[in-house]
Amino acid sequence: MPSIKLSEPKNPLIPTSNEEYSLDHCITKEELIQDIDFYKKKLEEVHPEPFRIISKDQFEKLVDNIIHQINQVNKNQFDIFESFFYFQEICALVQDGHTRIVNPYSVKNAYYIKSSKLFPLDIQVVDKKFFVRECWFETNIPKGSEILSINGKSIREIFDETIKFASATFEKYRYEFWSAELPSVLELYFGLKSPWTIEYKGKNGMKIIKLRGKEWTDVSKEKFQKKRYNFKTYNLTVNEQIVPVLVVPSFHYTLDSSFADEIDEFFLKIKDKEYLIIDLRRNLGGNGALGIYILRYLAKNDKSIESHISFDIKASKSYKQLVNYFIETFFVNENIPEEQRSFTYYKELTKGDKTADFRIKILEAETNDFVVKEIANFKQIKKENKFKGKVFLLISSETFSAGVVTAAAFKHNKLGVIVGRETGGRIGFFSDPIILELPNSNIRVSYPIAILNLFGGKLERGIAPDYEVRYTADDCIQQIDKDIELVKELISKDLE
């Protein structure tokens, strides 16, 4: 007899499916204010420590000011994007990079999509000037050009008006957050849509050019993701020595992805080299276990990498609801009839499974207590495949979340030399965000549920490099990679 297909349970924290989610959704002023109240209550319920940086009194006063501004608006209907920016401003008050508002375009497409069309320029902020760091597709604007205005609006004016939406602790990382959100700010906040008239200053003086955004097709999504998020490798030559470089801009891979296999293949190829550079300068996080897996290739013996001091998850009411949903989903996937489902049966079925063990601990904990969690380990690395040469790690103000976890473990385990700038994420930070939906606007918000304290320095600061490198506006114009140049100098001295 064929098995009966059981219906999928609904996520209690996100009742609206991606298919049902509408970018045309509007709400009243009263509904918007109700959602703000809901947001504040859930922030305190779910977040482990929402008022670490800002006091509760100050937060409440600033939110009241935003509500006052809403009440002064001479209309009663707000579309989903107007609501999004009000929540983004409130969220940014917490000054925590994992407390965020999900861009509505991301819900309908992919997490990195912020606007209806792909804005071609990746902007870097240096000394309050704005330079082209990367072009996502071919344009006539050279890298290193200084952007002056977009559609006649000064880029500095755009920055000053919208930096309030940047949700981060350190100023330099706030600049990076602003840069990542610029496409949504242009289109959704200012109404500056493609084509864009860009005024810029290059090596040959000032120019004005018109740029058209690209449609988000499957091809453009794949190309953008590969260019921005996928790791890549290349070689440098220093005094006739081949120096491999591993660039890892993201750890947004799953544990069962091909990531480990590709890393294995990379280290197999370079294991006999004398030097290695690992570039985490633009690593914006993901799965910290993947960073630790790379570091295990650098450890001199088979002991596991010490990665953190403590990793504690808050067992809030909302998180317990989510865990129950995960368990229900497990029962459905295993085709277990409702009458057989129970917490006890789940324990029996999943005995020895670490993920299940952790879920059980969450449900058995008192509400709002903290439960210790471990970072997952991958397979063992064969001793003969380990890298035995000298390693340089590059970090910057854009290194965040799992990138900081990796940098902290690298430093604590004394795996090599760190070059660059202090990381954008702190050594003691909030992590592992979960997504909730606001009841009226359907806007999705993320709250971290964990306190993760790393090794490597003061918890309130980021990981500091062994060699600090500072960039000027002129360095951006000349397209000089001062971090790589310093590493080449250090290798040259080492070879003398």
Image (cartoon, rainbow, N blue to C red):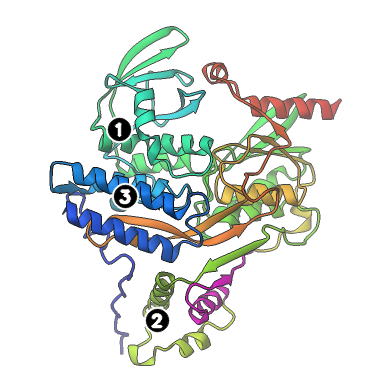
Residue 368 colored in magenta in the image: yes
Find residue 64 and name its label.
3
- Magenta-drawn segment: 354-378
Q: How crowded is mark 2: few (under 14 residues within 10 Å), some or many (20 or more)?
A: many
In the foreground, 463 or 345: 463
Q: Can you give x and y, in whole percent of width and height, for residue 337 in the image?
A: 34, 88
Question: According to the image, label 2 marks what residue?
Answer: 331
Mark 1: amino acid: Leu
Quarter of the figure with the N terminus: bottom left
In the foreground, 288 or 30: 30
In the image, is residue 154 above or below residue 345? above
Residue 494 colored in magenta in the image: no
Q: Which of marks 1 and 3 is nearer the N terminus?
A: 3
Q: Which of marks 2 and 3 is nearer the N terminus?
A: 3
**Closer to the observer: label 1 or label 3?**
3
State the separation of the CA atoms marked 2 and 3: 44 Å
Mark 3: amino acid: Asp
Q: In which quarter of the image is residue 312?
A: bottom right
Quarter of the figure with the C terminus: top right
Q: Which of marks 1 and 2 is nearer the N terminus?
A: 1
**Closer to the observer: label 1 or label 2?**
1
Q: With 374 as the anchor, is 103 left or right in this view?
A: left
Question: According to the image, label 1 marks what residue?
Answer: 186
**Closer to the observer: label 2 or label 3?**
3
